[in-house]
Image (spheres, rainbow, N blue to C red):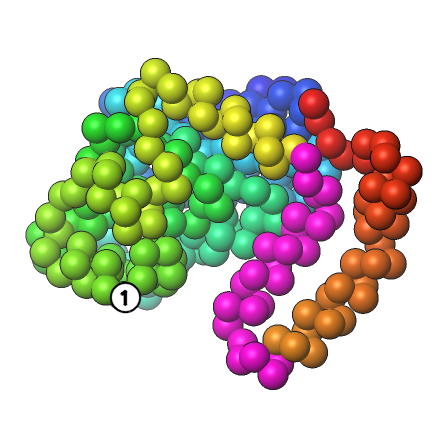
């Protein structure tokens, strides 16, 4: 299945692997109002589409995402404060939608990413970057703040690395991006698709319902204390034993057969 928007391209194969490509190559896939709205729409539909099991996020052309489009920034300056807050909130809602996607979100980071592009990387579950790509949280160089992306970037790379990168706005390479946790792994550009396919294959071995519940589990555990988590996790495992997937998975293991959700 292929679905085309004005600023993104969406393709889904027969395994249920959907690829969302930021499709403003002439603007280095910079974020503007249209791209944010279309990406949110696609993500919202995929979140509830049972035919979609995995989502790959990538960019068209040489860049992954250059951050915010300056023409979009400029147009917002002329608006009222209420209108500016609403425009800013559209990006916040998009990042939240991607971060809470109940399916694996794999970042195929094909090139440089700055500002909001780093935010987009930060909400992915697994990120594979092309060697030689450059990254930067460059907002302070423009007199701006990495505001909407900060909850996700700080959660991804931690407070120390956030200060190191956000306060100067200096660019850094793919090796450092991997070292601080922004990228899961770095490969040669020609090996990018092979690496993504390897990770996709691994994720296709997991039960979709269990994956969604595990993402919710991680989010909950990360934001609660140990005593609360002990109660919560005991309930969740008890629930999992009663699900159709849980029963099938246990029986498949005991019977030495392959559960239906695994793709070779």
Residue 106: % across, % down: 48, 37
Nearer-the-camera pick, 33 or 27: 27
Quadrant of res 164:
bottom left
Residue at point 85%, 32% (across, down): 257
Image quarter where the N terminus lies is top right
Residue at image location 73% in from the left, 66% down from the top:
236
Residue bounds of the magenta highlight: 205-228
Q: Residue 248 sits in which quadrant?
A: top right
249, above or below 217, in the image: above
Q: Nearer the viewer, residue 23 or 13?
A: 13
Q: Quadrant of the C terminus?
A: top right
Q: Which residue is pictured at 71% across the width and 50% down the height?
A: 210
Magenta segment main secondary structure: helix
Residue 165 visible to an observer of this rendering: yes
The residue where tag 1 is placed is 159
Eyeballing the image, is 153 above or below 18? Answer: below
Q: Residue at x 69, y 78 (%)?
A: 231
Q: Residue 101: horizontal and vertical position, in percent?
A: 56, 49
Q: Position of residue 259 (x, y in %)?
A: 82, 35
Query: Left or right of 12: which side holds 139?
Result: left
Q: Residues within 10 Å of mark 1 (few under 14, many from 20)?
A: few
Left or right: 84, with 255 as reference point: left
Q: Is residue 96 left or right of residue 24?
A: right
SS label for mark 1: helix
Q: Is residue 256 above or below residue 13?
A: below
Q: Is residue 50 left or right of residue 216?
A: right
Residue 209 in the magenta stretch? The answer is: yes
Tell me where residue 121 appears, x and y as whole percent. 37, 44
Q: Quick check: can you spot residue 83?
A: no
**Which of these two is toward me, 120 or 77?**
120
């Amino acid at each position: 299945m292929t679905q085309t928007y004005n600023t993104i391209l969406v393709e889904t194969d027969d395994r249920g692997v959907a690829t969302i490509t930021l499709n403003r190559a002439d603007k280095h896939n910079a974020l503007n109002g249209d791209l944010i709205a279309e990406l949110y729409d696609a993500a919202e539909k995929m979140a509830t589409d049972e035919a979609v099991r995995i989502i790959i996020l990538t960019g068209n052309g040489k860049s992954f995402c250059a951050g915010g489009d300056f023409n979009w920034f400029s147009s917002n300056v002329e608006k009222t404060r209420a209108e500016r807050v609403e425009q800013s909130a559209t990006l916040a809602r998009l990042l939240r939608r991607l971060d809470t996607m109940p399916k694996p979100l794999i970042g195929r980071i094909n090139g440089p990413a700055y500002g909001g592009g780093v935010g987009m990387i930060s909400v992915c579950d697994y990120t594979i970057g092309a060697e030689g790509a450059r990254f930067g949280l460059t907002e302070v160089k423009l007199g701006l703040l990495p505001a909407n992306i900060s909850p996700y970037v700080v959660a991804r790379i931690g407070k120390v690395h956030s200060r190191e990168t956000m306060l100067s706005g200096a660019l850094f390479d793919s090796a450092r991006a991997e070292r601080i946790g922004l990228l899961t792994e770095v490969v040669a550009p020609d090996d990018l698709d092979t690496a993504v396919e390897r990770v996709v294959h691994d994720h296709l071995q997991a039960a979709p319902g269990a994956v969604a519940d595990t993402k919710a589990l991680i989010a909950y555990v990360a934001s609660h204390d140990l005593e609360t988590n002990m109660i919560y996790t005991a309930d969740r495992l008890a629930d999992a034993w009663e699900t159709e997937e849980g029963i099938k998975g246990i029986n498949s293991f005991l019977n030495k057969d392959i559960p239906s959700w695994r793709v070779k």
